Image (cartoon, helix red, strand yellow):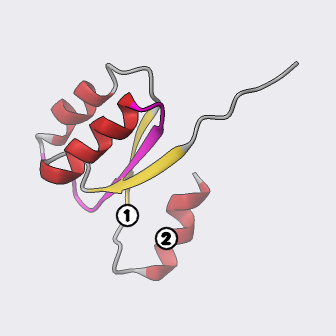
Amino acid sequence: MTHSIRPVAIVTGGWRGIGFGVAKALAGAGYDVAIAGLGAPNGASEALGELRQSSAKINYYESDLANLDRHSATVAH
């Protein structure tokens, strides 16, 4: 049995602006996308819902990029 492994990209702030555009392009190119950010605003669920319409796996992780101790916890997921 063979398993195909999809590449995974971590995009910070992927629920708005440039980050959203990057996340959408990566999802369309066959990547699963981990959206990392701190305190996503209410509009994030709409953006994440749009991204989840692709065949990509999309997950949101609350992560403070200024806190190095939390980086490994985000990547471990």
Task: Answer with left or right where residue 20 lies relative to residue 33.
Answer: left
- Magenta run includes residue 30: yes
Rendered residue at 15%/47% (across/down): 16
Task: Magenta stretch: give its range.
Answer: 29-41
Look at the numbered disc 1 and give the secondary structure of its residue.
Answer: loop
> Residue farthest to the right?
1
Task: Answer with left or right where residue 45 lies relative to residue 25.
Answer: left
Residue 69 point in image, percent of width and height: 50, 79
Number of numbered discs overlaid on the protein picture: 2
Residue 38 point in image, percent of width and height: 27, 62
> Residue farthest to the front?
29
Residue 10's quadrant in the figure? bottom left
Rendered residue at 19%/34% (across/down): 47
Look at the numbered disc 2 and give the secondary structure of its residue.
Answer: helix
Decide: is 10 above or below 23: below
Answer few, some or many: residues within 10 Å of disc 2's Cα (few below 14, many 20 plus, some between 14 and 19): some
Are the residues tagged 2 and 1 within 8 Å (C-beta)?
A: yes
Label 1: which residue? 63
Tell me the amino acid under the disc marked 2. His
Tell me the amino acid under the disc marked 1. Ser
- Magenta run includes residue 51: no
Decide: is 44 above or below 57: below
Residue 2 point in image, percent of width and height: 83, 22
Answer few, some or many: residues within 10 Å of disc 1's Cα (few below 14, many 20 plus, some between 14 and 19): some
Task: State the separation of the CA atoms marked 2 and 1.
Answer: 7 Å
Rendered residue at 17%/52% (across/down): 18
**Quadrant, the N terminus:** top right
Label 2: which residue? 71
The tag earlier along the polypeptide, 2 or 1, is 1
Instruction: Using the image as rendered, state which of residue 30 and residue 50 is in the foreground.
Output: 30
Q: Which mark is residue 51?
A: none
Rendered residue at 49%/70% (across/down): 71
